[in-house]
Amino acid sequence: MPEPRLTGLGGGLFCGTLMFVLGCLDRMLFEASPTVYGVLFLPVCLLTALWVRGGDLAAPPVVVPIAYAVGLLPVADGSGGLSGRLMGMATALATQAGWLYGGTLVAGVIATVRKVGLMRRRADKRRPPAP
């Protein structure tokens, strides 16, 4: 598996762009199914949390909810101009909050586990060898 190392901004761009593309594909192929969109959101959260650099591990739990909202633009049912689109987004966010919370939890847990491992490795390097 490749090991790209994204900055916090790069992780946000990766996640946001991928979710928007997946939202467009969901609209074309599955007639804007929120469930399909939510299922596709989870692996994107996983990859974002795995591929971000060690110094930017605070970013994935922040950027994945933003990316979810960006990708929801083509999926949300909105007709009647800007106000209709905003109501569709608010409705989709309210009714599909489980996917949003689940993906954010996935990203947060992975980032936390990675950060603890990184801190442990740094502590082991600083510890003097046992006699």
Image: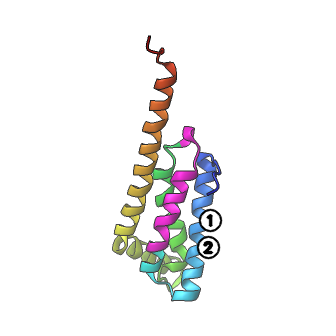
Magenta-colored segment: predominant secondary structure: helix
On residue 21, the disc is: 2
C-alpha span from label 2 to label 1: 6 Å
Q: Amino acid at mark 1?
A: Thr
Mark 1 = which residue? 17
Tell me which colouring the rendered structure shows: rainbow
Which quarter of the rendering shows the C terminus?
Answer: top left
- The quarter of the picture where residue 87 lies is bottom left
Q: Residue placed at 40% from the left, 50% from the top?
A: 109
Residue segment shown in magenta: 39-56
* Amino acid on which the number 2 mark rests in the picture: Val
Which residue lies at the image location 46% right of the left edge and 60% below the top edge?
65
Classed neighbour count for the residue bearing mark 2: other residues with Cα under 10 Å, few (<14), some (14–19), many (≥20): some
Q: Where in the figure is residue 117, as x and y percent of width and height?
A: 45, 38
> Was residue 54 drawn as part of the magenta stretch in this picture?
yes
Q: Element type at marker 2?
A: helix
**Front residue of this view, candidates 112 and 117:** 117
Q: Report crowding for label 1: few under 14, some 14 to 19, many 20 or more residues within 10 A (C-alpha).
A: some
Q: Position of residue 42 (x, y in %)?
A: 46, 66
Q: Quadrant of the N terminus?
A: bottom right
User: Residue pushed farthest front?
Assistant: 131
Q: Is 106 left, or right, of 53 in this rendering?
A: left
Residue 89, compared with residue 106, is above or below; it is below
